[in-house]
Amino acid sequence: MEETRKSAEEFLNLIKKSRRGKFKVYIGMSAGVGKTYRMLQEAHSLLRNGIDVKIGYIETHNRAETHALLEGLPVVPRRKLFYKGKELEELDVQAVINLRPEVVVVDELAHTNIEGSKNEKRWQDVLEILDAGINVISAVNIQHIESLNEDIREITRIEVKERIPDSVLAQADEVVNIDLTADELIARLKEGKIYEQAKIETALNNFFKSEHILQLRELALKEVASQVERKVETEITPLNPVKRERFLACISSNEKTARNVIRKTARLANYYNSKWYVLYVQTPRESADKIALDKQRHLINNFKLATELGAEIIKVENNNVSKAIIEQCGKRKITTICVGKPHLNLIRVILATNVFNELLKKLSTNDIDLVILS
């Protein structure tokens, strides 16, 4: 009976997948590389070839070359909302679904919608449009990918607030990198093709430093390479099937360490196109009636982050942490455990901490790798 139910669910998922729209994402290392320009060029090409394409939402940032490309393209009227006394515009998702174009272009995938919109984020709007069977072309910058948030902050010293879960990008049928050299991008900035004159000097001294651009460019290239590799693995049957990786991120109630472990494990799982889990072992000293409210809040936020990044959450009660971890490894067929870097000197921890000692002994006999994340 259970097998019949699973078979029916799999077939239903296959039907839904075949009805879903195709999703293409242009990705770039920063603003100004030409993602919007390229999307509009593609829209013109599709239109010339008889495809019913419409502009759902485009942000030209008053760039003359980009704005000129809007001419001749059918645009879906934006939805008007009043917020704090101002009339603002958003993508009209329902209008797009009602019009049912073959392809719709929706810019700024990481955008946060105005309060009062049906969805909080534009990527949620896009998923809704895709589920309606409409093909979508969209764009995002590398700094808006959730699992790269810490890396971006280290490079630029800027906290990027608007982010998309990695799982959204993983759903793309095609990911295209729009690449420029650091010199080409800086030249575009100086020529006033990215920001107005008043903002150029500030941009050159902050986000658009040559060393920042090079590192962001590397991240963008790696991300697209990873997406291509995943596509090859899922669409081409390998001659020699390899062992499937399964990652287990072990977290505590420490907010920053846990967040870092979650993001880095997500990157690893994303690279290997693998299933992954987040495990929190609740010991008696952190039981519901004893745990501090701030730690409880941190845990809830980190569970939410992990879910957005595609993890399955496991929460167990046990006073023996290493035993709980090993039990879950057996149940879930885990190949790699990811933990945060201990606050003490690592050698001292291995020698002095019973939990760590016990865990290492059990891992050595179970063919499971241990990754300690900085």
Image (cartoon, rainbow, N blue to C red):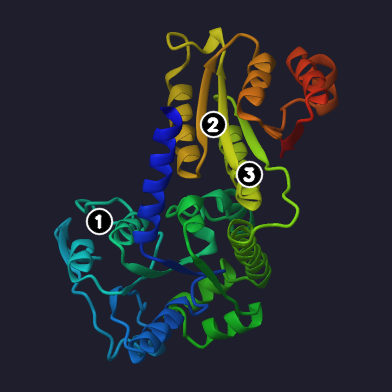
Q: Is residue 363 above or below residue 304?
A: above
From the viewer's side, name the closer residue of 315 and 262.
315
Relative side of 224 to 170, left or right: right
Q: Secondary structure at mark 3?
A: helix
Mark closer to the chain start, 2 or 3: 2
Cα gap from disc 3 to disc 1, whole angstroms: 31 Å
Residue 236 shows up from this direction: yes
Residue depicted at x 59% and y 80%? 186
Q: Amino acid at mark 2?
A: Glu
Return the disc, 2 or 1, that comes first in the chain's sequence.
1
Task: Give the percent coordinates (x, y) of residue 273.
Answer: 61, 50
Q: Residues within 10 Å of mark 3 (few under 14, many from 20)?
A: many
For label 3, the residue is: 264
Give the mark toward the camera: 3 or 1: 3
**Local crowd at mark 1 within 10 Å, few (<14), some, or many (≥20)?**
some
Q: Which residue position is annotated with label 2? A: 255
The percent coordinates of residue 313 (x first, y second) are 50, 30
* Three-letter amino acid code of the residue under disc 1: Ile
Q: Is residue 143 left or right of residue 228?
A: left
Q: Quadrant of the N terminus?
A: top left
Report the residue at 66% width, 23% height from top. Answer: 330
The residue under the point 46% across, 82% down is: 38
Of pointers 3 and 1, the one earlier in the residue sequence:
1
Res 79 label: none
Q: Which residue is mark 1?
A: 114
Q: Nearer the viewer, mark 2 or mark 3?
A: 3
Q: Looking at the rendering, which quadrant does residue 341 occupy?
A: top right
Distance of label 2 from label 1 (alpha carbons): 29 Å
